[in-house]
Image (cartoon, helix red, strand yellow):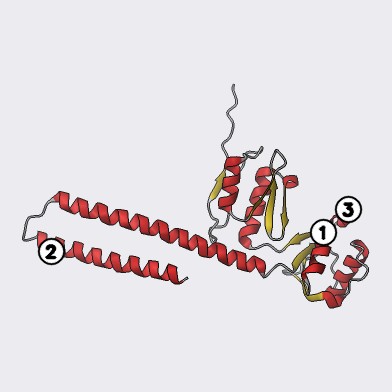
């Protein structure tokens, strides 16, 4: 952050000084002749500096955004989301979750004591159970439950990682481009399986764009991520031309 602040302060100081010089030259030009070529030269120099400074500033902002996303994802390592678990009034969510873990995932030694925090997300909707967010006390038990998720097949219950907004957008974009069966998450990263079976681990739109250039997806789509994040670039693939 200090580097970012110093860059912005330096840009502002240079901008104000250059603008003051331009203003001074304009005032002098009213009384003394000045050459267009000298003004053009100074303007080109200033424009070049500003473009370079803005590019560097953008890179620093992107770096800070990525570091923040990594820190936020790291704080979610022990959290999972369960979807489709039947909801009832005055329920004990921890007990409901424990029953799912024991009965559905067949982890017999699990107890509510291994849960640090557990609650439903969002507002209650009639006939639609809200997802359950659970934070476990230990990473090992979270990993054991996560790797047992295949036992939920056919139950109507699904499990997902609690991704940041940025990574969730990248995950949705990757699924749209490469297909649902080719994309999944692991430890907060998006895993994309290429046509040759190679697995690629990504976490940002830039990395998804790079992957697309190396291994173009079979589908043709245009997707974008929210404008309030660093990963706001539009991801597109070219459509094929069909001969008439």
- Label 1: which residue? 147
Give the answer, above or below, for where 200 lies relative to 230.
Answer: above
- Label 2: which residue? 27
Mark 3 vs 1, N-terminal side: 1
- Report, in whole angstroms, how far the alpha carbon at label 3 lies from the one at label 2: 79 Å
Mark 3 vs 2, N-terminal side: 2
Marks 3 and 2 in Cβ contact (< 8 Å): no
- Label 3: which residue? 154
Circle 2 Cα neighbour tier, 10 Å, few/some/many (<14 / 14–19 / ≥20) = few
The residue drawn where x is 61% and y is 59% is 166
In the rendered view, does 196 fall on the left or right side of 62?
right
Question: In the image, residue 243 lies at what x, y percent?
Answer: 59, 22
In the rendered view, does 225 fall on the left or right side of 28?
right
Residue 115 sits in quarter: bottom right
Name the front one of labels 3 and 1.
Answer: 1
- Report, in whole angstroms, how far the alpha carbon at label 2 lies from the one at label 1: 73 Å
- Report, in whole angstroms, how far the alpha carbon at label 3 lies from the one at label 1: 16 Å
Mark 2 vs 1, N-terminal side: 2
The residue drawn where x is 57% and y is 41% is 213
Circle 1 Cα neighbour tier, 10 Å, few/some/many (<14 / 14–19 / ≥20) = few
Q: Secondary structure at mark 1?
A: loop
Residue 81 sits in quarter: bottom right
Residue 132 visible in image: yes
The residue drawn where x is 66% and y is 58% is 168
Marks 2 and 1 in Cβ contact (< 8 Å): no
Question: In the image, residue 205 lies at what x, y percent?
Answer: 58, 52
């Amino acid at each position: 952050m200090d580097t970012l602040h110093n860059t912005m302060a330096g840009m502002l100081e240079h901008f104000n000084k250059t603008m003051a010089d331009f203003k001074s030259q304009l005032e002098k030009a009213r009384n003394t002749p000045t050459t267009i070529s000298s003004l053009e030269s100074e303007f080109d120099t200033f424009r070049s500096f500003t473009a370079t400074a803005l590019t560097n500033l953008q890179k620093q902002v992107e770096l800070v955004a990525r570091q923040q996303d990594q820190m936020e994802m790291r704080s979610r390592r022990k959290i999972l989301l369960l979807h489709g678990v039947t909801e009832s009034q005055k329920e004990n969510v921890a007990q409901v979750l424990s029953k799912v873990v024991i009965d559905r995932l067949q982890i017999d030694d699990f107890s509510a004591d291994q849960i640090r925090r557990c609650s439903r997300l969002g507002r209650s909707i009639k006939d639609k159970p809200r997802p359950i967010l659970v934070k476990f006390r230990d990473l090992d038990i979270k990993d054991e439950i996560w790797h047992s998720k295949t036992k939920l097949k056919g139950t109507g219950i699904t499990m997902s990682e609690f991704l940041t907004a940025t990574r969730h957008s990248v995950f949705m974009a990757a699924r749209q481009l490469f297909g649902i069966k080719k994309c999944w998450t692991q430890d907060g990263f998006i895993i994309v399986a290429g046509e040759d079976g190679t697995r690629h681990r990504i976490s940002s739109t830039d990395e998804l764009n790079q992957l697309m250039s190396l291994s173009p997806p079979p589908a043709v789509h245009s997707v974008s991520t929210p404008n309030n994040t660093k990963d706001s670039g539009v991801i597109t693939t070219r459509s094929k031309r069909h001969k008439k």
